[in-house]
Amino acid sequence: MKTPPARLSNSIATSLEPEGRFVGSGSNCPDCGFTSTERPALPGLAPSRMAELFSSNDPPIDPIELAILEAIVRDGDSYLSVLQQRISATRETLEALLKEQALHVKRVADAKALLNPVRGLPQDVLIEIFTACIPNRIEIAVSNEFDCLDTKSAPWVLSQVCASWRCTALATAKLWSCIGLSMDRYANHTKYVFRFGILLARSGSHPLMVSIYASADIARHPLLAMILPTSSRWTSLSVTALLCSFVLFNNISHSLPLLEFLGIHATTFGAPLENSRAVWGFQHAPRLQRLLVEVLGIMVTEPFLFSRQFILPEDSRELSRLFALTTPLDAAYLLQWHGARNVVNSRLWIVGTPVSEQGFVVPMIRHACLRDLTVTETASRGRPGSSAKLISQLQLPVLRSLTLSYKNPTAIMPAIRQGTVPALTHLHLLAAGLAIDGNAVIEMLKWTPGLTYLKLVFNFKTADIFIALRTVNDETFELIPRLHTLFLTGAQFDFKDHDFIITEMVVARRELVEEASLRVVCLNEGLGDGERWDRLRHDGLENCVAV
């Protein structure tokens, strides 16, 4: 294929345009300062001309183009060699720059580390930071499974940073005063006995917070023999162990002068106690403020009564909070126990009544100080109504808040009488997804005229409660006339026209007595809509709707 003369002349002119540039002019690179004295790059044809030549099988015929192409072939290898040398030199320069960069990065990091404010912290501030690394409450030590013998955590690691930190850590006895022992982990007794001895020595005479966990018998465990002699320094003690293991605490000095918190988590699995009142090691704790009792693994066929196995301290006048997971009879014992006479806050988790208790009657119990009581009936294989059996026998003249929570499929209301809770202002009935006898709730509300807060979270099968709440007698509501807050979020309504009936009750409560009218209503999404609710909100009703 022939190329037209005019087109050929234009192509030749274009092909002679310089493509390369001289890099040996002695000028410096504006970025890095590199100077090259090498010869210029080889000339070449323009890319468009090269594409034109490759578009056919004809050889180039122009003498100038032939000369250029022959020069490229003739001098190409030597020029590539020059380029390789330049590449090697550039790589060496790059490696040197990278090394210098790494060195400078390290220098900057070292300088920042040396200037870090932590290095100049006063010792008292450093001690505060150190103590924040260990649990400051027994609940944290238990929930986080704090292991005081783990050398990879505080306080051990704090003594391994530098000489000054080590001196500060070793001189701060408080750092070594949180004792968390997971007995099942210490298979190598010798190593842990040595380490525990160091920890006790470093704690000096500082008060101790002690948490012990064991799923097996610890009668022969050497660490227990080491911790028991320190009982006079305990401020908090939480023990989770087999029931038979608690007998070992009879070997303490029989005095716990500093103890403010006692947590007993006993499981009935394992060897039973042969004698009643077998655990008396905790009977003297004059400063006890909080008591937590959990009886784990109760079976409905086991004749276990916590009150028959443990002697609790009677000499404490400061005990104000009592928590227990146990049977109804044990809970009754704890509430009438002399040591609990000043308790103002109690949380009780009641398991189903064991077979061994079903023939017993809970005595009438009067507690003159209790102000806040929460009773949860847990799911178990025992007979439902355990919490109702207990509460029906209580007389709580100053109780302000009562919470009844149900985890059993059957929720049975207690029988509230005139003298049961005369001062009650807050009532919570929690049984999400469960049906509760509305008439039983109404009967309870008849004897709680001072209620200002009512929370009902269960499955409403009928409208009886809402109809009763709007019933008026002599311009006064028959039920809880001082009600200010009604909480229904989370409840289910399985009766017809529930939205209308609830609205009617709220309207009635708002219109009758202004100074004692309903002020806050919390509802599920979908309730509380429409003009009537808009007017209620405009008139001052606070309407909270769950989304």
Image: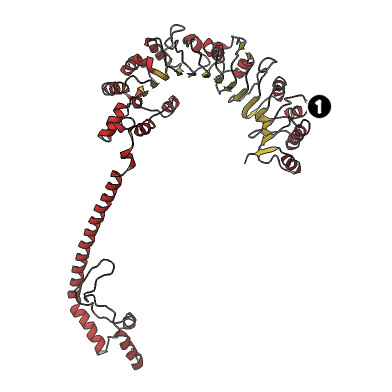
For this orientation, the residue located farthest to the right is 474
Does 501 sit left or right of 355 as displayed? right
Position of 190 relative to 333 (above/below): below
For the C terminus, the image quarter is top right
Residue at 26% x, 35% y: name it: 162
For this orientation, the residue located farthest to the bottom is 5
Of residues 220 and 404, which is closer to you in this image? 404
Position of 140 relative to 85 (above/below): above
Of residues 2 and 391, which is closer to you in this image? 391
Provide residue 313's location: percent of width, then percent of height: 47, 11
Quadrant of residue 331 within the rendered picture: top right
Which residue in the structure is indicated by mark 1?
475
Residue at 64% x, 25% y: name it: 426
Quadrant of residue 171 within the rendered picture: top left
Residue 211 seen in the figure: no
Residue 477 seen in the figure: yes
Provide residue 356's location: percent of width, then percent of height: 54, 11
Provide residue 19's location: percent of width, then percent of height: 29, 79
Are there few (<14), some (14-19), or many (20+) residues within 10 Å of tag 1? few
Provide residue 472's location: percent of width, then percent of height: 80, 27
Residue at 31% x, 29% y: name it: 169
Tell me the kind of residue under disc 1. Answer: Glu
Residue at 64% x, 35% y: name it: 489
For this orientation, the residue located farthest to the top is 275
Figure coloring = secondary structure
Of residues 337 and 433, which is closer to you in this image? 337
